[in-house]
Image: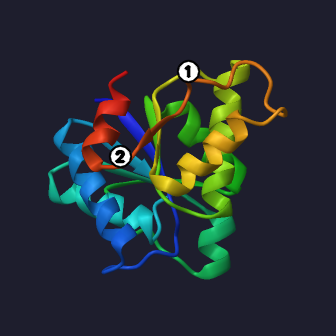
Amino acid sequence: MKIISVYGSAKVRPGDADYELAVAVGQKLADAGYTVMTGGYYGAMEAISKGAHSAGGHVIGVITDQIGKRYNLEPNAYVKEVINYAELRDRLQYMVHKADGYVAMPGGVGTLHEIAETWELMRIGGTKTRPFVCYGPLWETVIHALQGSPYLGEGYEGMITIAHSPDEVIEGLQL
């Protein structure tokens, strides 16, 4: 079964539009036969996990002592398989290298870091190029601004697809 790493904000809460959107994306991923892998905690990670779980999907949570112990967090209730790393960087490396594709939901600096690291590793050959979908107008603005800047150089174009609906996420992963 193919694994999709999903990045997103820990700040969204049940009832928020972005949380409910992530639940819908999680459901669509599981319905399409994907295993979902998230950072395992709350916010979009929980919402994706909840959606996938509700559709009968397998949910992997990749947690880290650097966050879990610092903030006294446990994996969300929908995670069925827990993988733990001491350091945040090792957690992200695992999520990049073990996935068959990536989805970035709305988020902040942490999500931006995950997007940038994944994108750069694919560009330099540090990991295989895989489908990568970024969701919504925030990432559309950021990705297009970067691609249009003089600072990226060659090799970044065409690696990220922008989605505006859960169905478009699934379409983007099937490139």
Residue 143's x, y, as percent? 62, 42
Is 170 rendered above or below residue 122? below
Q: Secondary structure at mark 1?
A: loop
Q: Which of 116 and 61 lies nearest the eye of the viewer?
A: 116
The kind of residue on which mark 2 rests is: Val
Image point 55% across, 62% down: which residue?
Answer: 107
Distance between mark 2 and mark 1 Cα atoms = 18 Å
Q: Nearer the viewer, mark 2 or mark 1?
A: 1
> Count the marks: how many?
2
Picture residue at 49% right of the left edge, 54% below the top: 137
| 137 is higher (above) or lower (below) than 160 | below
Q: Residue at x 70, y 19 (%)?
A: 155
Q: Which residue is mark 2?
A: 36
Amino acid type, label 1: Thr
- Residue 163: image tag: none
Q: Is residue 99 above or below residue 91?
A: above
Report x, y in % for residue 119: 64, 34
Q: Nearer the viewer, residue 130 or 94?
A: 130
**137 with respect to 109 (left or right):** left
Q: Is residue 62 visible?
A: no
Q: Horizontally, is 4 left or right of 31 in the view?
A: right
Residue 12 seen anywhere in this rendered image of the structure: yes
Where in the figure is residue 1, as x and y percent of width and height?
28, 29
Judging by the rendered image, the residue that carries numbered circle 1 is 129
Classify mark 2: helix, strand or loop: strand
Where is the C terminus found, in terms of image quarters?
Answer: top left
Q: Residue at x 68, y 62 (%)?
A: 109
Crowding at dot 1, Cα within 10 Å, few <14 / some 14-19 / many 20+, comes out as some
* Farthest residue, direction right: 151
Pointer 2 or 1: first along the chain: 2
Image quarter of residue 50: bottom left
Q: Residues within 10 Å of mark 2 (few under 14, many from 20)?
A: many
